[in-house]
Image: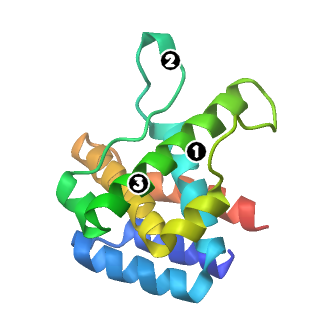
């Protein structure tokens, strides 16, 4: 597995308070840069594909990103945290729409490179928090966390190969 994918998996799977996750995400981003953002985004996509909630009836089949608590977003900066989350949601939605349409073309909007350039480790932090808290929610529902994480790890391994 690529070192940035290993770091993304560590951010997702190691339980830490949000402030420690933010610090770890920024450190990992300083080490890996864009490949970490890419790995975190792909982990988010893989997790949402397999375990995500479905949207409203008019969005049937579209996985949605759960909104982190305000205190988690604020750690990334009150305004910047919201902006990063909005950009992430836009990108995620456009990726899912392109996937449903079976096209490589994304609707106009910010790219993953834009998200990375503008928000660096903060973007990785939000993605790691979303997937990590999603894993925790599945555990609370009685699912095996190791199996869920193995599924994400397998996807990242295939992506790295």
Q: Residue at x 47, y 67 (%)?
A: 124
Tell me, yes or no, if residue 94 can be seen here.
Answer: yes
Q: Nearest the camera: 141 or 127?
A: 127
Q: Which residue is mark 3?
A: 83
Label 1 to label 2, Cα distance in Å?
A: 16 Å
Which residue lies most toward the left here? 71
Q: Residue at x 73, y 60 (%)?
A: 158
Left or right of 78 on screen, residue 34: right
Viewer-nearest of labels 1 and 2? 1
Label 3 to label 2, Cα distance in Å?
A: 23 Å
Q: Which residue is mark 1?
A: 91
Q: Residue at x 69, y 77 (%)?
A: 2
Q: Which residue is mark 2?
A: 59
10 Å crowding of disc 3: few (<14), some (14-19), many (20+): some
10 Å crowding of disc 1: few (<14), some (14-19), many (20+): many
Label 3 to label 1, Cα distance in Å?
A: 12 Å
SS for callout 1 = helix
């Amino acid at each position: 597995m690529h070192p940035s994918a290993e770091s993304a998996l560590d951010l997702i799977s190691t339980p830490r308070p949000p402030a420690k996750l933010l610090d770890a995400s920024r450190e990992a981003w300083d080490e890996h840069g864009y490949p970490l953002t890419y790995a975190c985004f792909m982990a988010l996509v893989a997790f949402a594909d397999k375990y995500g909630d479905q949207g409203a009836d008019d969005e049937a089949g579209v996985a949605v990103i759960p909104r982190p608590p305000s205190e988690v977003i604020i750690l990334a900066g009150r305004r910047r945290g919201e902006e990063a989350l909005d950009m992430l949601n836009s990108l995620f939605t456009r990726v899912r729409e392109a996937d449903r349409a079976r096209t490589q073309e994304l609707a106009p909007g910010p790219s993953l490179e834009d998200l990375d350039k503008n928000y660096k480790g903060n973007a990785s932090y939000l993605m790691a928090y979303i997937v990590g808290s999603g894993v925790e929610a599945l555990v609370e529902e009685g699912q095996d966390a190791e199996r869920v994480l193995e599924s994400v790890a397998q996807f990242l391994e295939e992506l790295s190969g």
